[in-house]
Image (cartoon, rainbow, N blue to C red):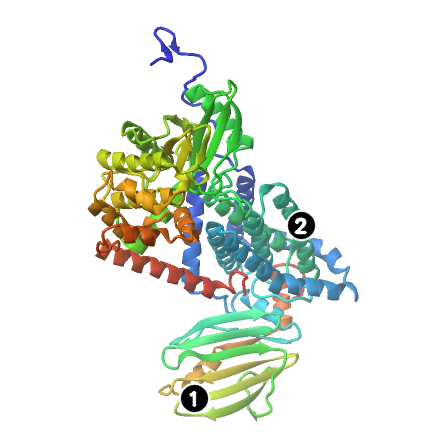
């Protein structure tokens, strides 16, 4: 028994080294097709709409995901626009004062754009405002990347209503609201 | 053969341990660690069930929410701020403070192994929590407003796990088992109870998140510490005590009594630890028999084996393979070596301690080397060093040279005077066919030991009767750095007569003997150790936040 305990302990030690050396495993980003969006919804309890991803365009991948009591932050890498080229923030409040209102591609929210630079190296901020919360995109592309990369990425973002999420929880899980 | 009577077997008093009977001090079977491991595995089974079916997740969540509602109903304007403060302290500060205290305490008390294990156990806990939490993906309690700080998924509760791990590790690293560790654990239970309640009250954790987080942490920490730093081998002692000195009361004391009686027919009346000042490689004991006989014994365990390995590694890094730096592979081989050396020293007539035998306490882990007790003896530093004693000391070295032996640890604590006769003890570092450098060092060290109690001029004059001028010149050309045992170095330094300098003036000048041995192996080993140290440092600094230290 003692030698087995030793073996387990040594495996644990190896695990510690591996977990210490390995890249940090990040959380799941809020995806529209599974329960990971619930945690994002809890991060901004006032928001009527919850952002979620329905797949990503070719060349984009999730880098880090941070979800806590202050909101949700998702950073994305691109093989063309560079690492951490786009950052999505879901918070209770945003400041769109420097941005201009533009027709929104998400009908549940108002859109504001603040383009600092088109090229070289697209740099811009897009804000979606809705009842009780907001979503903002921050783009900071490498010099040779085209601004159109952001359009495809924005297209992968959807807004789910809290009401629909609650109904879904009641249907498939337990009889409570978020 | 005198204890075997033809036709009657072994005489009474000695007893052979039959197959299947446990040794005097069996390997400890840690019930607490096993119980926590079972609890952890039970939760692991539930996690597996949750992975393949939603039913248990629904059932557990319903029960969790049922338990939470009465607690959440307690929310009042005066209690909520208190619970929020507790949530914040427990989540952001408590594990940082306890963790750093534990780490720095471990370093201050020279418990390097405990410090490494603290880092390892917190890393395993953090890694395991991350792995499981991302697979389960449990949201924070549904239908409740979260009033406190939280981050990521709910189960297992990360702050509870890290705080629990830090508290348990602190108990195992900083406190002796009784009574302080027990008191620390009682305090920890109270702290975790309050923190767990605050987590549930503020709606950031379900009750099972708290329980699972705590269970994972206790199981991992206990398993690592009890397996890799068991109390028997790595006892927690006060700073004043030597870490190499094992507690010989309690179960170990009883085991020593039984083993001495059964294996060498010596009925023990009293076990007294001795030689605490200068012995670090073993636990020296004076053992008094029921019949009044007294023997000397050195208790060796795996902790001493590891000390020997670290010592040899350090020497190899500092000087290269100056001598045989091969490590002992087991405690048994370590004690066999010293036992054999005692016989060789005695055969050489070098004023040795007569060996009596080796006594097994725990197979492969603890052994006693029993020798005669040199009664009515004092350390040479407490005796008047006469011309007669000087001659004996020099003759002793000459005998070792003739027999092809080196003591390698000649210092005041190892040279005793018994009724006017010089005796040399502790031959653990003894070597057969040593290098000429080592033989020269033994001579120089013996002359320094003798000169501490008399004049260097007299010692040198007497030495010329036994050794040639070239040999004396070589001795003091060799005497530097690694050659000095620390006790001798310190005694020579505090002596105002500059003994080493004086001997070098008396002896013919010789070119200093080079003690640095450079080889590809040494360079590779140095590079390897430096890389490992850097990697550990990088991992440590990079993981501070993950393991609750930042």
State which chain disc 1 sits on: A
Q: Is residue B126 above or below residue B414?
A: below
Circle 2 residues within 10 Å: few <14, some 14–19, many ≥20: few
Residue holding disc 2 = B187
B389 relative position to B223: left or right:
left
Which residue lies at the image location 29% right of the left edge and 29% below the top edge?
A: B349
Q: Are marks 1 and 2 on the same chain?
A: no
Q: Quick one: A63 or B158, which is closer to the camera? A: B158
Q: Quadrant of the C terminus of chain A?
A: bottom right
Residue holding disc 1 = A122
The percent coordinates of residue A137 (x first, y second) are 51, 82
Instruction: Say which quarter of the image contains residue B524.
Output: bottom left
The percent coordinates of residue B98 (x first, y second) are 59, 57
The percent coordinates of residue B453 (x first, y second) are 41, 42
Q: Quick one: B453 or B377, which is closer to the camera? A: B453
Q: How many marks?
A: 2
Q: Is residue B323 above or below residue B100?
A: above
Circle 1 residues within 10 Å: few <14, some 14–19, many ≥20: many
Q: Is residue A163 above or below residue A141?
A: above
- SS class, disc 2: helix
State which chain disc 2 sits on: B
Instruction: Say which quarter of the image contains residue B461.
Output: top left
Which residue lies at the image location 22% right of the left edge and 57% below the top edge?
A: B520
- SS class, disc 1: loop
């Amino acid at each position: 028994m003692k030698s087995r305990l030793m073996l387990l302990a040594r495996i644990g030690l190896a695990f510690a080294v591996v977990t210490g050396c390995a890249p940090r495993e990040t959380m799941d980003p809020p995806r529209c097709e599974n329960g990971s969006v619930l945690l994002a919804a809890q991060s901004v309890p006032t928001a009527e709409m919850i952002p979620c991803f329905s797949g990503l365009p070719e060349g984009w991948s999730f880098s880090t995901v941070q979800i806590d009591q202050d909101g949700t932050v998702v950073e994305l890498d691109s093989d063309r626009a560079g690492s951490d080229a786009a950052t999505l923030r879901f918070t209770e409040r945003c400041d769109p004062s420097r941005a201009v209102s533009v027709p929104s591609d998400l009908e549940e929210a108002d859109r504001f754009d603040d383009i600092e630079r088109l090229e070289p190296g697209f740099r811009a901020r897009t804000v979606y405002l809705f009842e009780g919360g907001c979503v903002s995109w921050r783009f900071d592309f490498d010099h040779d990347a085209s601004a159109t990369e952001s359009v495809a990425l924005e297209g992968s973002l959807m807004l789910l209503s809290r009401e629909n999420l609650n109904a879904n929880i009641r249907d498939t899980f337990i009889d409570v609201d978020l | 053969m005198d204890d075997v009577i033809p036709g009657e077997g072994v005489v009474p008093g000695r007893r052979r341990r039959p197959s299947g009977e446990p040794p005097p001090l069996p390997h400890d079977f840690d019930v607490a660690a096993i119980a926590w491991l079972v609890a952890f595995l039970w939760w692991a089974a539930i996690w597996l069930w949750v992975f393949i079916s939603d039913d248990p997740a629904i059932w557990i969540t319903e029960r969790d929410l049922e338990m939470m509602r009465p607690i959440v109903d307690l929310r009042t304007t005066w209690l909520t701020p208190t619970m929020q403060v507790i949530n914040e302290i427990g989540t952001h500060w408590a594990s940082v403070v306890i963790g750093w205290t534990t780490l720095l305490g471990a370093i201050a008390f020279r418990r390097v192994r405990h410090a490494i294990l603290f880092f390892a156990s917190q890393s395993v806990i953090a890694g395991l929590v991350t792995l499981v939490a991302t697979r389960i993906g449990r949201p924070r309690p549904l239908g409740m407003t979260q009033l406190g700080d939280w981050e990521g998924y709910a189960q297992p509760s990360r702050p509870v796990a890290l705080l629990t791990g830090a508290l348990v590790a602190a108990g195992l690293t900083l406190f002796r088992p009784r009574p302080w560790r027990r008191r620390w654990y009682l305090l920890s239970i109270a702290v975790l109870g309050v923190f767990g309640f605050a987590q549930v009250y503020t709606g950031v954790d379900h009750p099972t998140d708290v329980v699972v987080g705590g269970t994972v942490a206790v199981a991992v920490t206990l398993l690592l510490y009890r397996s890799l730093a068991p109390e028997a081998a790595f006892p927690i002692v006060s700073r004043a005590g030597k870490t190499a000195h094992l507690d010989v009361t309690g179960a170990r004391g009883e085991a020593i009594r039984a083993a001495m009686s059964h294996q060498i027919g010596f009925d023990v009346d009293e076990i007294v630890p001795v030689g605490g000042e200068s012995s670090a490689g073993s636990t020296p004991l004076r053992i008094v028999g029921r019949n009044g006989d007294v023997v000397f014994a050195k208790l060796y365990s795996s902790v001493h084996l590891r000390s020997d390995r670290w010592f040899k590694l350090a020497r190899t890094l500092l000087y290269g393979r100056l001598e045989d730096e091969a490590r002992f592979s087991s405690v048994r081989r370590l004690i066999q070596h010293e036992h054999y050396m005692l016989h060789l020293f005695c055969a050489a007539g070098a004023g040795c301690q007569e060996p009596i035998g080796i006594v097994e306490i725990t197979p492969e882990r603890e052994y006693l080397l029993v020798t005669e007790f040199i009664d009515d003896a004092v350390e040479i530093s407490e005796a008047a060093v006469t011309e007669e004693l000087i001659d004996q000391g020099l003759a002793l070295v000459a005998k070792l040279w003739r027999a092809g032996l080196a003591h390698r640890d000649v210092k005041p604590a190892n040279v005793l005077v018994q009724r006017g006769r010089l005796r040399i003890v502790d031959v653990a570092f003894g070597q057969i066919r040593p290098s000429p450098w080592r033989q020269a060092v033994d001579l120089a060290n013996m002359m320094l030991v003798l000169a501490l109690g008399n004049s260097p001029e007299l010692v040198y004059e007497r030495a010329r009767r036994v050794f040639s001028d070239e040999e004396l010149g070589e001795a003091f050309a060799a005497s530097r750095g690694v050659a000095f045992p620390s006790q001798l170095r310190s005694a020579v330094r505090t002596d105002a007569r500059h003994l080493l300098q004086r001997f070098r003036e008396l002896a013919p000048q010789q070119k200093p003997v080079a003690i640095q041995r450079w080889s590809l192996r040494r360079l590779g080993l140095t590079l390897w150790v430096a890389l490992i140290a850097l990697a550990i440092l990088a991992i440590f600094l990079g993981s501070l936040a993950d393991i609750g230290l930042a």
